Amino acid sequence: MTDDADHAAPDESALWRADRMLDARGIACPLPVLKARKLLAGMARDSRLLVEATDPMAAIDIPHLCQQDGHRLVLQERLEEGGRLILRFLIERGASAAQAD
């Protein structure tokens, strides 16, 4: 007989583990991506940044930032909270990231 806990799905919060968080809800383009770039530039390689945004352009801008600056987009999701769209991105900082001044 096996314990059901051994076969449980991974804890949602463990999947979204981040070293830093950027709350960009209510901030319009291009600020969410600019703030994310600045935070990532100051983080160690392989550390993770969780970004939450409400601007629909973040769905394009954040993946583009990752591709352009050499980061890895680990997870992304769209959810609704209180009738408002929330976009979540988990970014792992890459080695060849562009440096912010």
Image: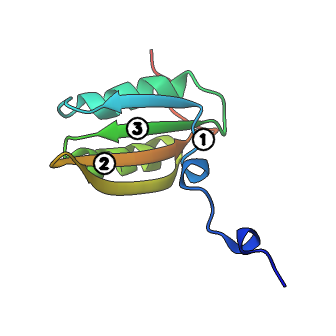
Q: Position of residue 95 (x, y in %)?
A: 64, 38
Residue 50: image tag: none
Q: Earlier in the sequence, mark 1 or mark 3?
A: 3
How packed is label 1: few (under 14 Cα within 10 Å), some, or many (20 or more)? Answer: many
Q: Earlier in the sequence, mark 2 or mark 3?
A: 3
Against 78, residue 69 (above or below) is above
Quadrant holding the C terminus? top left
Q: How many marks?
A: 3
> What's the residue type where badge 1 is placed?
Gly
- In this view, the residue farthest toward the front is 1
> What's the residue type where badge 3 is placed?
Val
Q: Which residue is mark 3?
A: 51
Q: Which residue is mark 2?
A: 87
Instruction: Decide which of 5, 65 is in the foreground and name it.
Output: 5
CA gap, disc 2 and disc 1 = 21 Å
Q: Nearer the viewer, mark 1 or mark 3?
A: 3
Residue drawn 27% across and 44% down? 58
Relative to 24, 45 lies left or right: right
Q: Which residue is mark 1?
A: 94
How packed is label 2: few (under 14 Cα within 10 Å), some, or many (20 or more)? Answer: many
**In which quarter of the view is residue 68 placed?**
top left
Relative to 55, 21 lies left or right: right
**In which quarter of the view is residue 42 placed?**
top right
Q: Judging from the image, what secondary structure is the residue with disc 2 in? A: strand
How packed is label 3: few (under 14 Cα within 10 Å), some, or many (20 or more)? Answer: many
Q: Earlier in the sequence, mark 2 or mark 1?
A: 2
CA gap, disc 1 and disc 3 = 16 Å
**In which quarter of the view is residue 36 placed?**
top left
Q: Position of residue 37 (x, y in %)?
A: 42, 30
- In this view, the residue farthest toward the bottom is 1
Residue drawn 21% across and 29% down? 27
